[in-house]
Image: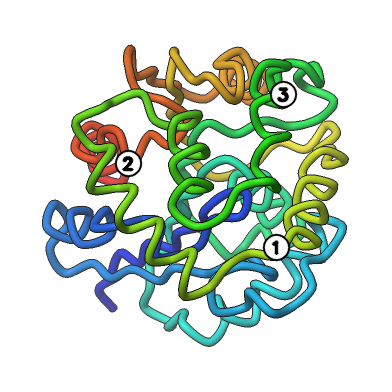
């Protein structure tokens, strides 16, 4: 039976499937015959009215129901996850090692491997304190200025994020719950038994690039760094990201 590439995409903190923008479509253009499934973290996206779990492990258990519903026997399952999604990916591979055949982890971090001030830079933490005081477009612009370094994509990305905020706003309670889950996440001595690719942004102003380097070093897996992009690598340079992902899965 011929295997079909099936990309499963996980976003990060208080982000959802629509925040991928046109990245999934561009990914399929470079991988003809493949398919994508985007799974939202509980508390965001289609689940924005649902309380977000206080642990990454519980997030995995809930999200796996969507995975099982989408997966087919002939699928070659490839995980692409960014930030908090990368923590979920690690726990998933630990809890259910047979689910995915390969994984790409973008700008993520794990407690026990990296220092707290690297997992969320102090200046970024101070910057984020203002988020609850803002609403609508101003709120999304504030977040975007932290996670994006490429001004040429700012307006288009901001328009999309404003629409998402209006349609499915993440509550303050769920924001705090997701921060708690991510901040307390530890992966221990686990090492995946499938091929892993790490992608990172050297100029990430939210999470230190040292976090991705530490994971790559601990697991002895390849890492590629983008020299100018920000934390939201797929928004700043989707073409570079897709090129690396496509080369990896081939």
Q: Residue furthest bottom?
A: 69
- In the picture, measured across the screen, residue 201 lies left or right of residue 85, that is left
Work out how far the residue at label 3 is from the one at label 2, CA to CA, in angstroms. Answer: 23 Å
Residue 79: give x, y in percent of width and height: 47, 54
- In the picture, measured across the screen, residue 101 lies left or right of residue 117, that is left
| Residue tagged 3 | 126
Circle 2 crowding by C-alpha within 10 Å: few under 14, some 14–19, many from 20: many
Helix, strand or loop for disc 3: helix
User: Tag 2 or tag 3, which sits nearer the N-term?
Assistant: 3
* Tags 1 and 2 touching, CB below 8 Å: no
Q: Which mark is residue 96?
A: 1
User: Tag 2 or tag 1, which sits nearer the N-term?
Assistant: 1
Image quadrant where one finds the C terminus: top left
Helix, strand or loop for disc 2: helix
User: Tag 1 or tag 3, which sits nearer the N-term?
Assistant: 1
> What residue sits 45% from the left and 24% below the top?
200
Residue 36: give x, y in percent of width and height: 33, 68
- In the picture, measured across the screen, residue 57 lies left or right of residue 154, that is right
* Quarter of the image where one finds residue 121: top right
Foreground of the two, 190 or 158 = 158
Circle 3 crowding by C-alpha within 10 Å: few under 14, some 14–19, many from 20: few
Foreground of the two, 43 or 152 = 152
| Residue tagged 2 | 235
Residue 68: give x, y in percent of width and height: 57, 81
Q: Which mark is residue 47?
A: none
> What residue sits 67% from the left and 30% below the top?
109
């Amino acid at each position: 039976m011929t295997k079909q590439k099936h990309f499963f995409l996980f976003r990060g903190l208080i982000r959802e499937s629509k925040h991928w923008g046109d990245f999934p479509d561009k990914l399929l253009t470079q991988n003809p015959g493949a398919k994508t499934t985007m799974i939202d973290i509980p508390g965001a996206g289609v689940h924005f009215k649902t309380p977000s779990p206080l642990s990454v492990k519980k997030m995995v258990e809930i999200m796996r129901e969507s995975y099982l519903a989408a997966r087919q026997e002939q699928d070659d399952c490839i995980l692409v996850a960014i930030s908090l999604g990368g923590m979920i990916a690690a726990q998933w591979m630990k809890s259910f090692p047979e689910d995915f055949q390969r994984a790409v982890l973008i700008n993520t971090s794990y407690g026990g491997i990296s220092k707290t001030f690297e997992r969320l830079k102090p200046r970024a933490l101070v910057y984020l304190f203002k988020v609850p005081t803002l609403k609508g477009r101003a709120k999304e612009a504030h977040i975007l200025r932290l996670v994006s370094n490429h001004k040429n994509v700012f307006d288009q990305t901001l328009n999309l994020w404003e629409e998402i905020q209006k349609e499915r706003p993440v509550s303050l309670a769920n924001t705090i719950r997701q921060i708690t889950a991510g901040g307390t996440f530890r992966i221990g001595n686990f090492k995946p038994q499938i091929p892993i690719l790490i992608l990172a942004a050297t100029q990430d102003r939210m999470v230190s690039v040292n976090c991705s380097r530490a994971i790559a070093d601990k697991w002895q897996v390849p890492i590629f760094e983008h020299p100018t992009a920000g934390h939201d690598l797929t928004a700043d340079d989707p073409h570079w990201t897709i090129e690396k992902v496509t080369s990896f899965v081939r």
